[in-house]
Image: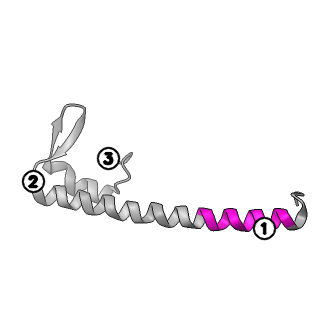
Amino acid sequence: MLAAGLNTELIREVLPRMAEEGAVLAPTCEEMAQALKHERERMGRSIEQLRAAHSVLGSIIHAGEAITGGRRA
């Protein structure tokens, strides 16, 4: 669950309501499934924000390279 990006507080809440389903854990109630879906949506928004920031930084770097001719400081 840590590898999936969940914090330990959420894991502590979720773990007692999970069942092993083959090689993965599965929520045993709809409430827990919804909580996990909301967490995944939150992560998705964070990923999109990081992608946007990454793109802006790439543009800044590219503009700087155009000015400096790609010389390193």
Residue 73 badge: none
Judge left or right: residue 13 versus residue 30: right
Q: Which residue is mark 2?
A: 29
Could you tell me which secondary element the residue under label 2 belongs to?
loop
| 61 vs 32, nearest the viewer | 61
Q: Nearer the viewer, mark 3 or mark 1?
A: 1
**Residue range (magenta):** 54-66
Could you tell me which secondary element the residue under label 3 belongs to?
loop
Q: CA distance from mark 3 to mark 2?
A: 17 Å
Q: Main secondary structure of the magenta part?
A: helix
Neighbourhood count class around disc 3 (C-alpha, 10 Å): few under 14, some 14–19, many 20 upward: few
Where does residue 15 sit, x and y in percent of width and height? 20, 49
Residue 1 badge: 3
Q: Nearer the viewer, mark 3 or mark 2?
A: 2
Residue located 54% across and 61% down the image: 51
Q: Which residue is mark 1?
A: 63
* Residue 22 versus residue 35 in the image, above or below: above
Q: CA distance from mark 3 to mark 1?
A: 40 Å
